[in-house]
Image (tube, rainbow, N blue to C red):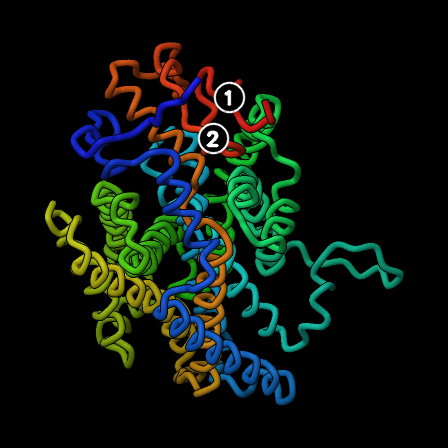
Amino acid sequence: MESKTTALKPETAEDPAEGRLIEGNQTYKSLDETIGSIVLSTKPPRAWIVVVGLAFLLVNMLLTTIGYLLYKGVGIWGINIPSGWGQDIINFVWWIGIGHAGTLISAILLLMRQQWRNSINRFAEAMTIFAVVCAGLYPLLHTGRPWLAYWMFPYPNVLGMWPQFRSPLIWDVFAVSTYMTVSALFWFIGLIPDFATLRDRARSRIAQVAYGALALGWTGSAKHWFRYETAYLILAGLSTPLVLSVHTIVSFDFAVSLVPGFHATIFPPYFVAGAVFAGFAMVLTLALPIRALYGLKHLITEKHLDWMAKIMLTTGLIVFYGYMTELFYGWYSANKYEQFLVYNRLYGPYNYLYYALLFCNGVAPQILWWNKARRHVITLFIVSMFINVGMWLERFVIIPMSLTRDFLPSSWGYYTPTEWDWSMFLGTIGLFLFLMFMFIKFVPMINIFEMKDLLHKLAGDHHGNGHDGNGHGTAAAAAHPVPATVTAAQPHNGAEQNRSGDGR
């Protein structure tokens, strides 16, 4: 029997529950072609080649910096007494914060059944992994002896030398390594159905074998979907606490100390909100140009931009509340050291950076109260860049500004980053961009099967068939057959899974 194509016409894309999440006359086949062609095309856009080339040059600069660092030691950085932490820890916390949006979008929004995550979750998950890779370089190299990093793990050894578990730096090792492991596993599990789609669509024998191996024998049978959903939900449940725990533990690096500016009980929620704030800003910074480059406006719609802007605005207000709370605590505490911290931030040698921080993270995002600004691409991109800079300045204000003005005026100093600090930072940005754009070329940046699932729900609502409270298609919705092009990674709603890519 000839199958029909489930399509979503432009006038039906507006769903009262979901909003405009897919635009244009879309079918399962068009989603396969739109997303899959980016990966399977042998000729990437010229802009992709330019960005990858520039990023590769920065990666080489990073390797040169690391080589010279291992030869000369960490003294090539600007760290000194009393500022033993400089750009190395600033950038570590900044990169870890950027990685938080991926886990929030993927795990928490999945558990909350927020369908607008489908177009951006794969992209954000990859960003998480690559940001953690960049972050991990800094504490590893900051030790001065990265070849002895295994000492920080509780491995059995004849020396009987165990890590100091009361050290926040050891807490970082366990938190970040756990975050990296769970995020990478969660990312790969979500890719398996899409790898099967690429396996079936690829024409090159090498691509067929490569994607076939990555698909792990996926056929799209009901058994596979059941096991997939079970594993995916378990990993989402494991990932959700990591959003709170990882950056909370990173904040303990500072909060458990006695240094004015570090010793603050507000740091855990303040750091977590700031991480989500920075993460969504980076998602928009990268997604907006890529959306325009590959013509994905019908899949990453204004509705997605609006929701991300709202989350940025909300978390930005929490972060700005944290800034005001720090000023209030310093004044109200009647502690001369805390009061001097406030004075130092407002009138000290780095005060211009503090005012820039307040503008970037406190003033600039307020334009997002305006509905048109939340949907305007250029405005969103500019605001996101302000936030990226502002969150880096926040870490600078917390770390060197606090360390260079501590309890004893005789130990005061001044921190100035060297050219090696900046080359290391730019090198990690190049590494991040290089990994991101290689991901875009070889892996679907948008979740194919989840977009088909969303298309099915919207099309079912259009035909009056709806779906139940658990998001599964009703019997009436399943009566609309899917096209023959939907094989391994077709949606699993209703009766469709029984005629999926199990070869029958």
Circle 2: is it few (<14), some (14-19), or many (20+) Cα within 10 Å?
Answer: many
Q: Up-down: is 269 above or below 411?
A: above
Q: Are marks 1 and 2 in contact (CB under 8 Å)?
A: yes
The residue under the point 53% across, 37% down is 193
Give the image quarter of residue 302. Answer: top left
| Residue 27 seen in the current view | yes
The residue under the point 41% across, 54% down is 38
Please, what is the three-letter code of the amino acid marked with disc 1?
Gln
The Cα–Cα distance between marks 1 and 2, rounded to whole angstroms, is 8 Å
Coordinates of residue 312 in the picture (x, y in percent): 27, 49
Please tell me whether mark 1 sits on a helix, a strand or a loop: helix
In the rendered view, does 327 fall on the left or right side of 194?
Answer: left
Coordinates of residue 88 in the picture (x, y in percent): 49, 73
The residue under the point 13% across, 54% down is 367
**Towards the viewer: 128 or 171:** 128
Please tell me whether mark 2 sits on a helix, a strand or a loop: loop
Coordinates of residue 394 in the picture (x, y in percent): 33, 65
Mark 2 highlights which residue?
490
Q: Quadrant of the N terminus?
A: top left
Q: Up-down: is 243 above or below 69?
A: above
Coordinates of residue 389 in the picture (x, y in percent): 30, 68
Q: Up-down: is 198 above or below 75?
A: above
Please, what is the three-letter code of the amino acid marked with disc 2?
Gln
Q: Up-down: is 280 above or below 420?
A: above
Residue 497 shows which numbered tag?
Answer: 1
Circle 1: is it few (<14), some (14-19), or many (20+) Cα within 10 Å?
Answer: many
In the rendered view, does 442 fall on the left or right side of 282?
Answer: right
